Amino acid sequence: MRHDSSSLEKLLENPRVWRGKSQTWTEQGIASGFEKLDRQLPGSGWPPNSLTEILTEQYGIGELQLLMPALSKLSADDPLVPYAEPGWIAWVAPPFQPYPPALQQWRINLSRLLIVRPKDDSEILWSAEQALSSGTCSAVLLWPETLSDQDSRRLQLAAEKGSSWCIAFRPLSARNQPSAAALRIAMRADGHGTHLDIFKSRGGQPVSISNLFSG
C-alpha cells in the first residue's frame, strides 16, 4: 500500500503526536506556579486536556496546595488567561468538605466551584467523565476508590474531548498499576519538606523533586 508522505509529515507536525524518545512533548503546559516543578514538565507545566494522577500515602500532605496556583488561573474571569476559557472547577467525591476561606486565600473563584458527591465508586467515574467531556469544566478533580487501566483511558479520552484537565488522587499502592495518565506523580512529606517523584511523564523523563514548597 502506498502512503502519502506529505499527509504523514503533516500528521507528525501536530504537537499532540508523541513519537517516543525521538521527540519531546511540546504542547504548552498549564503553569503550576512552582518553578522547580515546571522545569521538569514537558511544556513547562501541567499537561492540558489529559489525565494527571497524584499518589499519596494519606491526604492533607500538600496535594491540594500543589494544584492551587493552576486552579486559580483556570477559574479566573480574566480573559487574558491563556490556558483555557474560564470554566467550572469540579470536585468529584472529595473525602473532606472544601473550606471556602482557604480557597479564597488561593484566589480560587468560588462561583466556579462545583462539588459532586456520587453515591458509589461507579458513579464517581461516570460523574467525572460527564464533567470532563461537557466542555464547560476547566478542571475536574476526583478521588476514586479504585481506578482500572480501562477507567483511566475513559478519563483520558473525556479530558481530550472536553479540553479539560483531569486530576485523580490515588493511594501510593496504585503506583505499579497500569494507567493511561499523561503524568503520574508520587507525593510524600517528611520533616524536611514535601517531595515529588515523577515516575511517568509523557514526553519527559522520570525525576525526583525535593522540598518543593521551599522555593
Image (tube, rainbow, N blue to C red):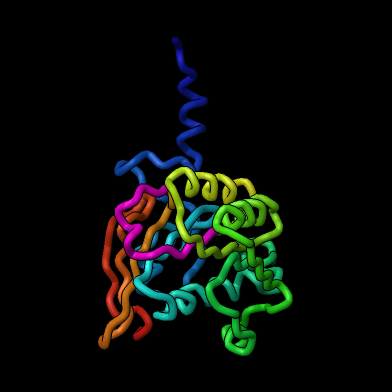
Q: Which percent across, then down, holds residue 23?
A: 35, 44
Whether residue 163 can be seen here:
no
User: Is residue 43 a member of the stretch shown in magenta?
Assistant: no
In x, y percent, where is residue 73? 60, 73
Q: Residue at x 32, y 70 (%)?
A: 196
Query: Picture quarter containing residue 110?
Result: bottom right
Image vertical order of residue 31 relative to residue 12, above or below: below
- Figure quadrant of the C terminus: bottom left
Q: Residue at x 34, y 78 (%)?
A: 212
- In percent of width and height, residue 99 lies at 60, 85
Question: Left or right of 105: which side holds 180?
Answer: left
User: In this view of the protein, which residue sits in the foreground, 140 or 18?
Assistant: 140
Q: Magenta residues, as a range?
A: 166-179
Of all residues, the one furthest to the front in this rendering is 119
Quarter assignment of residue 34: bottom left
34 or 99: nearer the viewer: 99
Q: Which residue is depicted at the point 46% across and 17% down?
A: 3
